[in-house]
Structures are given as C-alpha cells and as structure tokens.
Amino acid sequence: MKTRLAVLAVVALALASTGLAQDSRGAATATIGGEKVEIDYGQPQLKGRDLSELMKQLPPDRIWRAGVNQVSTLTTGADLMVGGKKVPAGKYSVYVHAGEAGGWSFILNEDLGVPLGKIWDGAPDNMKNEPWPHGNYADIADKEVARVELMKGPAGEPMDKLTMAFKEKEGKVGLLITWGDRAWMTGIAPAK
C-alpha cells in the first residue's frame, strides 16, 4: 500500500509540475540493420538543480525510469546488440541504474508499464490509458531483457533537459544520453 501511495504522490507531483505538457517528451530514431529503431522518452528538466543531488533521492536499488511521466520506450524492428547484449525485435521500457559511485547502466525491460487510470482515479480521460512506470522496479525485475554498462560519453554543452540521441560515427551507432554537464553512451548494432 505504501508503494502505491508513493507512486500516486509522484504521479500527482509530476502532473502538477508539467501540466501534462506534451512538450516534455523527446524522441530519437535511427536505422540499424535496415530497420527503424526509436526511443521515446520523457524529458525531465534540472531547472537549476544539481544532478548529483537529484540522484541521491533514488530508491535503494538506484533504478531510475529514464524520463518523466509516461514510460520511456525503445522500439526496434530488428534484433539488436545493445552494449554487447542481444535484444530481440520488439518494444521495451527503458530504465537506468545510477550507481552511487557514478557508473550508470542502461536497462531494457519487457514490462511496458501500467495504465495511469489504474493507479490514479483522477487521471484525465486523455491520459487514462497512457503507460506509466511501476513504483517499484523489483516488481518487474524478472522481465529485464538487457542491462549494459554505459560509458562516459562526450560531454558537450550542458543540457537542462534529459536528452537521448543516436549518434553515428565511422559506420557505428551509439545511443548518447545527456543531462546536465554529463553524458553516457552505449553502442547499438545489428544482431549477429
């Protein structure tokens, strides 16, 4: 019951702070192995806050839903190698493990979330069926498809909004995650 109340409190806070603004979503696409790969994600903003301080607020398992509001997803039409791990074609929810020592891991999970209307009676009609992350990652940990260590990426200009982008260099594709003055990256390639 405490978990459900915590989820509702987070949902209410998120909805109040964003006003369900659709511009809080980001997307990136790439063609890998001849197939479209897309990541759709919420874009939380730092708004002057320190990223390290925000990460200290994570639950004990240090799993973060890699976005804000609806579930962040990766959809691929082809089998992929993500950071050296095979990921079958399909749609996955995206999470990040933010280690206390600073290392981050990229996580893909088969569970695509729970409809907002099932966890919040006051959900607006247009949002009732939108998938939201579970309040406790342990509830879906058994559906994890891949967890890969992220490498520190090239930190360019600081980004107030969380940003995910596919970057191509010398015929290789990487997923670059940037937030604040930090960046992380993992390679993505067609499965062998």
Image (cartoon, rainbow, N blue to C red):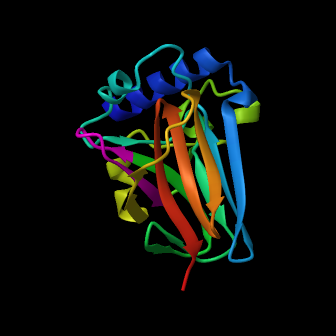
Taking 128 as reference, is 103 above or below it? below
Q: Position of residue 69 (x, y in %)?
A: 58, 33
Q: Main secondary structure of the magenta part?
A: strand
- Taking the view exactly as shown, the residue that stands out farthest to the bottom is 192
Q: Position of residue 189 (x, y in %)?
A: 57, 72
Which of these two is toward me, 33 or 70? 33
- Taking the view exactly as shown, the residue that stands out farthest to the front is 170
Work out which quarter of the rendered image holds the N terminus and state it. top left
Work out which quarter of the rendered image holds the C terminus and state it. bottom right
Q: Position of residue 146 (x, y in %)?
A: 42, 65
User: In percent of the image, x 55 and y 66: which residue is there?
Assistant: 188
Q: Which residues are magenta?
A: 97-109
**Looking at the image, can residue 94 be seen?**
yes
Left or right position of 180 against 99: right
Q: Position of residue 130 (x, y in %)?
A: 66, 42
Q: Which of the 4 image quadrants contains residue 51?
A: top left
User: In percent of the image, x 38 and y 24: which residue is there?
Assistant: 54
Taking 140 as reference, is 7 above or below it? above
User: In percent of the image, x 40 and y 54: which residue is there?
Assistant: 150
Question: Is residue 105 in the magenta section?
Answer: yes
User: In percent of the image, x 50 and y 44: which residue is there?
Assistant: 154
Which of these two is toward me, 102 or 153? 153
Question: Is residue 57 in the magenta section?
Answer: no
Q: How many marks are shown on the rendered structure?
A: 0
**Looking at the image, can residue 110 be seen?**
no
Taking 91 as reference, is 17 above or below it? above
